[in-house]
Image: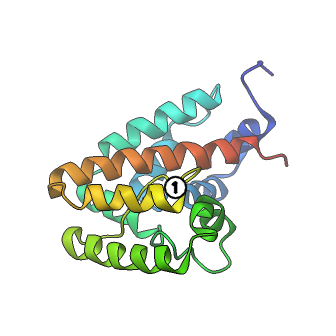
Amino acid sequence: MTPTSTPGLTRFNALEEHAARTALHEACASTAWAERLLAARPYATAEDLYTASDAAMAELAAEDLAEAMAGHPPIGRPKPGDPTSAREQRGMAGASDALKAEMLELNLAYQERFGHVFLICATGLTGEQMRDAVRERLGNTPEREREIVRTELGKINRIRLARLVAEEA
């Protein structure tokens, strides 16, 4: 095993296709993204996997991007029983009722403007930082916002893939 290889990456590379597809789908809801990553297995290093993820994200068509976004709950409302969603949105957990109400209003305004949930790599962000980001991004053009969403999804995917390859058997 090389110094950059991990037991989790070795295990991911060895998974049967169906199991690997399921693991990737938990990281990102885009079928096209998962298929591109599956086709490039095995990965020599985790960085190779992240690079492949970034390349696949950059190539997603609009409908694939929409499929990826559909796998994300609104900020402030993580999926019940989903530890990943709750962990990623931890910054909203201790938010005041006023901030939660404001985020709900901003989420609705964003969804009305762009036709999808506000998506941000929320890991490590406070509720106030997420609120400020949605306020700022409401002024974007749909084209600009689509590219920001693509970048944010790429960040989320990297974090989720890092957890996947860091996991012990």
| Figure colour scheme | rainbow
Quarter location, residue 133: bottom left
Q: Choose between 146 and 29: the one closer to the eye.
A: 146
**Left/right of residue 84 with respect to residue 129 in the rendered view:** right
Q: Choose between 29 and 162: the one closer to the eye.
A: 162
Tell me the amino acid under the disc marked 1. Ala
Quarter location, residue 3: top right
Question: Dot 1, crowdedness within 10 Å: few (<14), some or many (≥20)?
Answer: many
What residue is drawn where x is 65% and y is 72%? 82
Whole-percent x, y for residue 20 in the image: 63, 52
What residue is drawn where x is 18% and y is 54%? 140
Please tell me whether mark 1 sits on a helix, a strand or a loop: loop
What residue is drawn where x is 81% and y is 22%? 1
**Left/right of residue 169 with respect to residue 137 in the rendered view:** right
Examine the rendered structure and indicate whether residue 98 appears above or below residue 89: below
Outermost residue to the right:
169
Whole-percent x, y for residue 165 in the image: 70, 41
State how many labels appear. Answer: 1
User: Would residue 38 be visible to someone looking at this image?
Assistant: no
Quarter location, residue 43: top right
Q: Choose between 139 and 16: the one closer to the eye.
A: 139
Examine the rendered structure and indicate whether residue 27 appears above or below residue 43: below
> What residue would you read off at disc 1?
122
**Left/right of residue 81 with respect to residue 48 in the rendered view:** right
User: Would residue 105 be visible to someone looking at this image?
Assistant: yes
Whole-percent x, y for residue 36 in the image: 44, 44
Q: Choose between 12 and 148: the one closer to the eye.
A: 148
